[in-house]
Amino acid sequence: MFVDDLGEIVATRRLCVVDDGKRKEVEVLLGMPRKLQGGEDYACPVLIKGLGNERIRSIVGVDGFQAIQLAIKFIGVELNAHGKTGKHIQWEGSGKEGDLGFPLSGDIS
């Protein structure tokens, strides 16, 4: 069973996407991990708003820490994949071009 709502939001990040010369806001929301009903695993809900296909994703780990780690990796991979579609995604919190502040899958373990 997966979570179908964000619950308590523990972190947000605002990014900007440039598509056909137009700038629009992208918001990443991370919910608090919670124990899945009837099991030992935890799910961390994630929502990326502003890139289309907006739905809450449940990222599952063996405990709350792993669920958060995997959720952060998932966000990095999703944003990176979207950036490869020709849309330029920026995070103003970084001074480096292409740095969105989220690791790609191999960057944290």
Image (cartoon, helix red, strand yellow):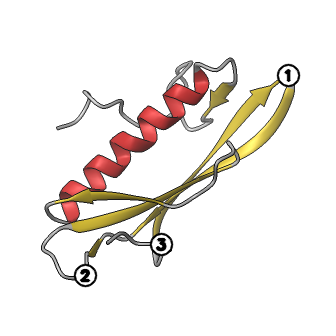
* Residue 14 image position (x, y, % from top left): 63, 48
Splitting the image into 4 quarters, where does residue 82 fall?
top right
What amino acid does circle 2 point to?
Answer: Gln
What residue did someone put label 1 on? 20
Counting from the top left corner in percent of width and height, residue 56 is at 52, 61
Pointer 1 with pointer 2, Cβ within 8 A:
no
The residue under the point 36% across, 46% down is 72
Residue 65 in view of the camera: yes
> SS at mark 1?
loop
| Label 2 crowd (10 A; few <14 / some 14-19 / many >=20) | few
Q: Earlier in the sequence, mark 2 or mark 3?
A: 3
Identify the residue position indicated by label 3 in the image.
4
Q: Which mark is residue 37?
A: 2
- Closest to the camera, between mark 3 and mark 1, is 3
User: Gap between marks 3 and 1, in whole Å?
Assistant: 33 Å
Q: Secondary structure at mark 3?
A: loop
First reached walking from the N terminus: tag 3 or tag 1 = 3
Residue drawn at (64%, 48%), measured in percent from left and top?
53
Q: Residue 73, percent across and down?
A: 34, 40
